[in-house]
Amino acid sequence: MTSLLQNLGWRAEALGWDAYQGLFRSMGLERASDAGARLLRMLGPRTKPHHIARVNMQIAFPDAHPRELDQLLDRMWDNFGRLAGEFPNLHRFDLSPDSEHVEFHGREVLEEMQRTGQPAVLISGHLANWELMPAMIMRHLPTCRITYRHANNPFIDRRIVDQREAYGVKIFAPKGGLGAKEIMKALGEGHSVALLNDQKMNDGIAAPFFGREAMTASGPARMALRFRVPLLPMSVRRIEGVRFRMQVHEPIELPEGQGPEAVRETVTRINRFMEDRINEAPAQWFWVHRRFDKAIYRGAES
């Protein structure tokens, strides 16, 4: 049972969330994106996640000069601040074929899947403004099931779900045991599923990522192998300001079988895809996540 103090704390956090949403929504899309970038470029380096991001970058780019990492971190906060400013304004993005906001390569792939009923496991990562991908998927593949991670605060979680529904993302399966069952059922019924697969998962499997073994979710690999459906990666990249390029890539080749070796090989290929996308635009990934073993970060947050 939720305690009274916890409930009050959640409600106070929700009020702060509403204030943030209202302020940035009142600015409009472009001004909010610019304001978020300025704000987090100033505040981000003063936070603990800044040090986590630096450790991650040192692992990924061991030959980089400290000054290069400083510049990369500055651009990372610029992108993350833009995302924060854009989130309250997602409904203002134009996702049409002639959009000035999103240049989408591969929409015909999703439309063909919708027409033929061919299911797939769609994967991506926390790149640029990753919130745009589910909206674009639902526009062209409306039967797709999209996973999400609950916010810890149920009042904020409800607001986020409502906001996503308002810009067209209406089918969700929560991450976790119940969500996994829903996703497996959906694939069995011929529906596609979409997941972000780039963060650490303690109950996943160890697979190479930027030269280190990193615990990675094996669910997408297992599902694609079990149902022998395409494992279809997507990416989004910020071009400038509120302009993006989104792409459906070639399917990741699946090995034979579905045993442990096949799963690990598939997860390794997924991680390799993510490495390639990160290397293309290194400032646009979610570096503030503890992606590797926790011992690596000891002392980094002090």
Image: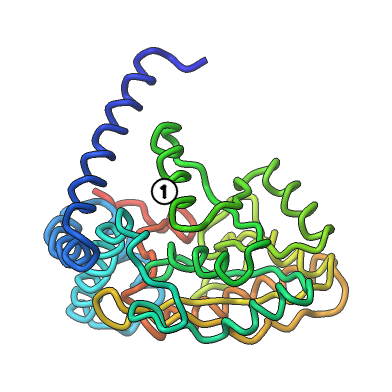
- The disc labelled 1 sits on which kind of residue? Gln
Q: Residue furthest top?
A: 4
- Name the one closer to the observer, 42 or 93: 93
Q: Is residue 121 left or right of residue 7?
A: right
Count the labels in the image.
1
Measured as percent of width and height from the top left, residue 134 is found at 52, 63
Residue shown at the point (59%, 72%) measured from the top left: 140
The image shows residue 171, relative to residue 71, as above or below, that is above
Residue 61 in view: no
The residue lying furthest to the right in this view is: 257
Residue under the image location 78 percent in, 76 percent down: 116
Q: Quadrant of residue 244?
A: bottom left
- Up-down: is 280 above or below 164? below
What is the quadrant of residue 252 in the picture?
bottom right
Give the percent coordinates (x, y) of residue 54.
Answer: 29, 66
Taking the spot 64% from the left edge, 87% from the top edge, the residue there is 250
The residue beneath circle 1 is 163
- Is 269 positioned to the left or the right of 8 in the image? right
